[in-house]
Structures are given as structure tokens and as C-alpha cells.
Image (cartoon, rainbow, N blue to C red):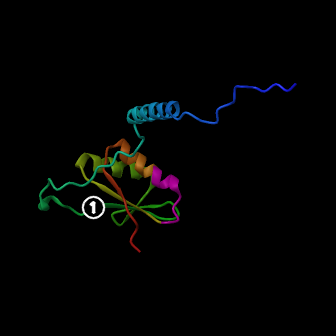
Amino acid sequence: MALKKKSRVSAEFSMSSLTDIIFLLLIFFMLTSSMVIPNALNLKLPSSTGSSQSITRPNKLVIQSNGTYVFNGGRVADDQLEQQIRSLSRSGKNLTIAPHPKTENQHVVRVMDLAFKYKVNTVLAEPDQ
């Protein structure tokens, strides 16, 4: 005598609970992403509030491939570099940093750290060829 099961397994799948979970996850990620503060550079963009007469020739610091510094056309020793940047801070002038393409990063970072220390606005530019 063969016995048959009367209850069969249903092959249907209910999507309603899955959509609820996805909706809750979407809300959760939207709320948490707005709380995250991005770690970005504090850039100061140029503005047109000043008059055109106040524009002066920018102070340019060229960093050569061997790590020597040339400030406004004159060579600067390592120990005098901090004094030059400090003087820019007192006069409220900007600094353009132009490293040679083969300059080591440590030289560029050193100048940028000094400029940040003395609150000098800097621009990183390509050197003149």
C-alpha cells in the first residue's frame, strides 16, 4: 500500500518582505552617508572682490630636481626658506610653488607644510620650461 503526501511544497516566493528590507537598507544608507564628513583639501578659490590695481607679481618658489630652492629668481638655502615664507605671511602675499617634475615629494611637502604653518596661500603650478 503506497501512501502519498497530501501537502506539497509551494514553489512560489513572496517578494514583499524582500522589498521591505531593501527599502529599510536604502533609508539607512542615505541617512548615514549624510553624516559622514569627507576628508578633503581646504581649497581657497579665487574671487573677484579685489580691485584690479591690487594685483601684484606672484612670489614664485621653484624647487629644482636636486632639491634646491629658487625664490623669485634667487637661490635660497634650506635654513633661509622658513624665513622667506614667514616674511610672505607678514606681508599677506601668496606663494606659487613650481616643482621640477623629477623633484622628490618630500621637498614639495616641506614647503607646503611651512606655508600651512604660517598661513600663506599657495598655488601649485608647473615650472617654466
Instruction: Tell me the magenta residue range.
Output: 101-109
x, y percent for residue 1: 88, 24
Q: For the image shown, how many numbered marks are present on the structure?
A: 1
Q: Amino acid at mark 1?
A: Pro
Residue occupying image coordinates x 46% and y 51%: 109
Residue occupying image coordinates x 41% and y 36%: 30
Residue sitting farthest toward the right: 1
x, y percent for residue 4: 78, 27
x, y percent for residue 23: 45, 34
Q: Nearer the viewer, residue 65 or 18?
A: 18
Residue sitting farthest toward the bottom: 129
Secondary structure beneath label 1: loop
Q: Is residue 76 magenta?
A: no
Residue sitting farthest toward the front: 1
x, y percent for residue 24: 45, 30
Using residue 55 as the reference point, say whether residue 82 is left or right of it.
right
- Residue that mark 1 sits on: 58
- Identify whether 11 is placed above or below 129: above
Q: Nearer the viewer, residue 84 or 110?
A: 110
- Identify whether 66 is placed above or below 35: below
